[in-house]
Amino acid sequence: MIETFLKVRWVALGLLLAVAGLVAPGVETASVPDNALTVWFLETDPKLQEYYRFQETFGNDEVILVEIQEPNGVFSKNALEKIKAFGERLAQIQGVDRVSSIVTVDDAVLKDEALAFEKAIPESIPDDPAILEGLHERLVDNPLFSGRLVSSDGKRAMVWVQMGDMNEIDVRRDAIVDEVYRVADEMLGDTRHPIGGVGVIYSGLNKQTRADVGILTPASYLLLFLALWWVFPSFRLVLAALGVVALATFICLGVYGLFGNQINTVMLILPTLITVLGLADAIHFPAALAHQLEESQGSTRFEVIKGAIRRVFVPCLFTTLTTMVGFLALAASPMDVLRKLGIYGALGIGLALLSSVVLMAVVFFFMPDSMPVAKRAWIGTMLNSVRAKVTNNTKAMAALALGLFALSLYGASLVTTDLDTLGYLPEDSKVRLEHTELEGGWGYYTPLEFVVAPADGYSINSAEVLNAMETFVKKAEALEAVNTGFSLATLYRRMSAVFGATPEILAEPMSDGMAAQLGMVLEFQDYEWDKQESSYADNILAPLRNEEGSMGRVTLTVPQMTASGFDSLYKDLETIGDEAFGEYASFRPTGYLPLYISIIGYVLESQIRSFYLALALIFLLMLVWLRSFRLALISLVPNVFPVAMMLGTMGYLGIDLDLGTATITAIVLGVAIDDTVHFLYYWRRAENQRKSWSECLEYTFNRAGEPATITTFVLVVGFPVLMLAGVKSVAYVGMLMTLSALSALFADVVLLPILLKYFRPSWDRKAL
């Protein structure tokens, strides 16, 4: 089979390059970042479907907020005209559905002794100071606007930019945000205008992801070039090895993009993983050729290359399969993004092996007749020292390994699961700095959404339901984490005040008569909007209830928090809501934040599922490969060790399990097993020759020790590249993978021999 392949190697290379050409258009698609919340979830996820239903009813809740700071006050002709012109320009941006500000919204007014609704700020903005002062007094204390559209001191105005349809936004988000920034800078000039919101955070992550790709790719290839030159000082071999991973990565990303997938903060690690792990296997091929040239002097070049590939293909195939298993275990995750990392990671590793075989087979025919195997004395010295300590101080080394294991397990128990989208960005990023400015000056602005469904016998206009909404908002506002609240009851109270209700009446629960009377006014206004054949979205009721009137909406503004912070706040609000709504209505959180919170559970579930699935599959592969239940079972311990070390480090350093680190456990398991495969392969051969434990140790170290050390060196050079990423979760993955690689080597050269000493075959059981 290998002989036939070598004869058609150029055809194989041509086919591989042709595939790369066919999938090339997909690379462009894959290279466009998309970090929107919805990309993490399966389309069939009930929580995602609930989110879509909310958006269909109330519009996209992915908003951009622009705060306009006017030290001399918002209520001047110049300032109001500036806000109006700015809003009109924003509304022209493709992908923007609606722009809301104090100059666009309606207010309840008395007209001919009847309630009506008209623009809070007249279309023709007055320049009379008395009129402007009157607008100031009327609007800054208006519950419809205060804290949402204008600050209580009248010196700040907030413009809400609501994005359009999600299908369009996923493609245009960055362009929309960039255009909002450009228009704001152009039209507001020196007027301070910090910008924030969910859409801005997602776009910031997209830009940081794009920047990280530009840094990580060249940095990884440069460092790995130097590492490979140290391993094999041959320009041809170094280029061939880099060509292997470049081709595998390109094809993998091309296939990924052809299926409509885009890169994100999780998938950002995929190219580096393929590059580093692919090289770790690729370097075995030149090593095999060097040994084959040394051992087969006088043979033809064809026979030498055939022997070299035969020598290394099966072990590399098996280590590739174990690494692929680690990735494929992620396919059991309930999250779409983790499934894709698992599937495409496995594809990339498989392609790396295929590319290694094809490219090396071609390049080997152009290599010189001799390739001296570089002897690195320090590796031999280190391995001999370790072997001596394991042999002569078994109990002490076992105690060291056991102590590290115990400390790691305790640290692992400290690990928490959380998500901090804003916190992933660098602290000096514009998005974070302006977010801090917004919360420090304006106050909390992140919307927290709830929907209210009246119980049988009640309607959304029932006094009991309206009072419950009002009670819920007031009690929520008493919490430190809630800034303001807004609901249909807010509109009813504003209408009551305009009707002439006294402060004493406004402080009392709304009566059935008042609710019915105001409800009739709103129904009339609704009728008037229908007559004008305008969209229901233009109705003053649209942000507060659905068109059928069967569902109400309550919005609170809160700080931007981690997922666990939002979850804790939701639990407090749930208690308040249960007391407020009682038998009158049901209420539930909705919008993007419940989806955001659900990631906590999904991350933990993914970690557990993928780890145990990878462990089980690797055990089965080892059982097939080694044909020894004892050795297969023993192999699991040194490969769980680097996972424990990694989790323990996370616990001690306070690194959360999140979308980035959730992927790492199964991957580490799949990577760590690679060198264990080689160690146990030679150990089994030594045992089959009836060698003693010490002889097995020497035999294995002489054959697998140096390759394992060199492979670890490549991993330790490659993985830290991820630490250059601006996205913190990606940087953590780089650090943790580096630690895991070192831990895996320690486990293979220390822990594994100790276990094999204590659990020797029956014929070799001697006194320790």
Image (cartoon, helix red, strand yellow):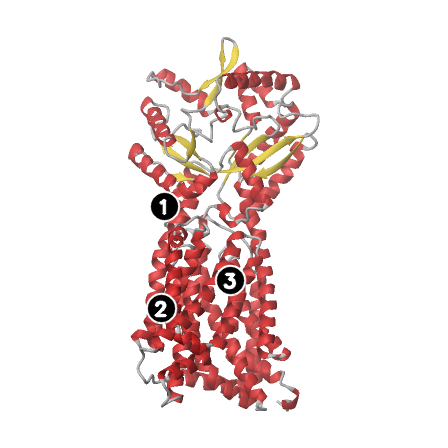
Give whichever of discs 1 and 2 has the lower sequence position.
2
Q: Position of residue 160 (x, y in %)?
A: 43, 33
Q: Where is residue 142 in the image (x, y as percent from the top left)?
A: 48, 24
- Residue pointed to by mark 2: 242
Number of other residues with Cα within 10 Å of mark 1, as a class: few under 14, some 14 to 19, many 20 or more: some
Task: Between residue 347 and residue 361, name the one nearer to us.
Answer: 361
Task: Between residue 458 and residue 129, name the one nearer to us.
Answer: 458
Contact flag, marks 1 and 2 (Cβ < 8 Å): no
**Tag 2 secondary structure:** helix
Q: Horizontally, is 584 left or right of 415 in the view?
A: right
Say which residue appears at 58% left-offset and 74% top-offset. 622
Q: How many labels does the image show?
A: 3
The reply to whether residue 731 is in sight is no
Number of other residues with Cα within 10 Å of mark 3, as a class: few under 14, some 14 to 19, many 20 or more: many
Mark 1 vs mark 2, foreground winner is 2
**Tag 3 secondary structure:** helix
Q: In which quarter of the image is the C terminus?
A: bottom right
Question: Eyeballing the image, is 540 above or below 408?
Answer: above
Measured in 3D between alpha carbons, the distance from the residue under mark 3 to the one under mark 1, in whole angstroms, is 30 Å
- Residue pointed to by mark 3: 664
Q: Where is residue 96 in the image (x, y as percent from the top left)?
A: 41, 34
Tell me the amino acid under the disc marked 3.
Ile
Q: Which corner quadrant of the image does residue 473 belong to?
A: top right
Give whichever of discs 2 and 3 has the lower sequence position.
2
Residue 430 got which mark?
1
Tell me the amino acid under the disc marked 1.
Lys
Say which residue appears at 34% left-offset and 78% top-offset. 365
**Tag 1 secondary structure:** helix
Give whichever of discs 3 and 1 has the lower sequence position.
1
